C-alpha cells in the first residue's frame, strides 16, 4: 500500500511540475510585449530548468514519456476542425501541397546537416581527448 501511495504521489508531483511550467509560460506570454506562443515559452523554460539543474529529468520523466507516447491524441481536435474550413483549404490546395513539400525537403536538409555537424564535433572531441591522453 505504501508503495502504491509513493508511486501516486510521484505521478501527482510530475503532473504538478508540468502544469506549473505551463502556467508560468502563460504568465510570461501575457507579460511579453510581443505575441509569442506560451507552448514554446514553456519548452524553453523547461529546457532552462533542466540545463541549470533546477529540475532533474527524473522529476518529469514518466509524465513526459506519457505525453510523448500519446501526442497524436492531442492533434485529433485540430485535425477534425480542419473539416470546417475545407472550402478554404480546397481553394489553396496547390499552395498548401507546395509549401508542405518544400518545408519537408528543407527540414530533411537541415536535419542532415545538423547530424553531420554533430558527428564531426563529436569525432573532433574524441580525437582531442585521445591526443590529450597520449601526452
Image (cartoon, grey):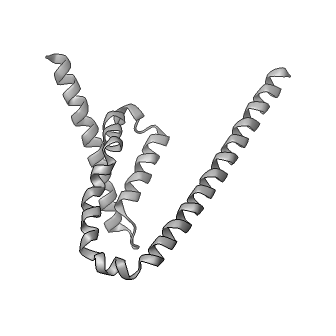
Q: Looking at the rendering, in which quadrant would you find the C terminus?
A: top right
Q: Residue at x 47, y 71 (%)?
A: 97
Q: Residue at x 37, y 54 (%)?
A: 42
Residue 83 location, x and y as percent? 26, 70
Residue 27 location, x and y as percent? 30, 61
Residue 88, compared with residue 66, is above or below; it is below
Asked whether 115 or 84 is in front, the reply is 84
Asked whether 129 or 55 is in front, the reply is 129
Give the residue at the far right of this rendering.
135
Asked whether 92 or 115 is in front, the reply is 92
Q: Looking at the rendering, in which quadrant would you find the N terminus?
A: top left
Residue 27, compared with residue 59, is above or below; it is below
For this view, does 90 lie left or right of residue 16?
Answer: right
For this view, does 109 lie left or right of residue 24?
Answer: right
Give the residue at the far left of this rendering.
1
Counting the numbered discs, the total is 0
Q: Residue at x 25, y 64 (%)?
A: 80
Quadrant of res 68: top left
Asked whether 84 or 127 is in front, the reply is 84
Q: Residue at x 40, y 67 (%)?
A: 36
For this view, does 5 lie left or right of residue 99?
Answer: left
Residue 107 location, x and y as percent? 56, 59
Amino acid at each position: 500500500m505504501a508503495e502504491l501511495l509513493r508511486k501516486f504521489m510521484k505521478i501527482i508531483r510530475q503532473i504538478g511540475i508540468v502544469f506549473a511550467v505551463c502556467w508560468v509560460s502563460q504568465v510570461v506570454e501575457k507579460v511579453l510585449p510581443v505575441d509569442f506562443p506560451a507552448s514554446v515559452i514553456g519548452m524553453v523554460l523547461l529546457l532552462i530548468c533542466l540545463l541549470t539543474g533546477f529540475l532533474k529529468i527524473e522529476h518529469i520523466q514518466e509524465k513526459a514519456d506519457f505525453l510523448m507516447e500519446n501526442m497524436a491524441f492531442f492533434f485529433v481536435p485540430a485535425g477534425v476542425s480542419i473539416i470546417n474550413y475545407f472550402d478554404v483549404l480546397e481553394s489553396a490546395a496547390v499552395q498548401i501541397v507546395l509549401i508542405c513539400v518544400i518545408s519537408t525537403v528543407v527540414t530533411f536538409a537541415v536535419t542532415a546537416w545538423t547530424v553531420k555537424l554533430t558527428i564531426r564535433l563529436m569525432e573532433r572531441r574524441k580525437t582531442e581527448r585521445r591526443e590529450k591522453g597520449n601526452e
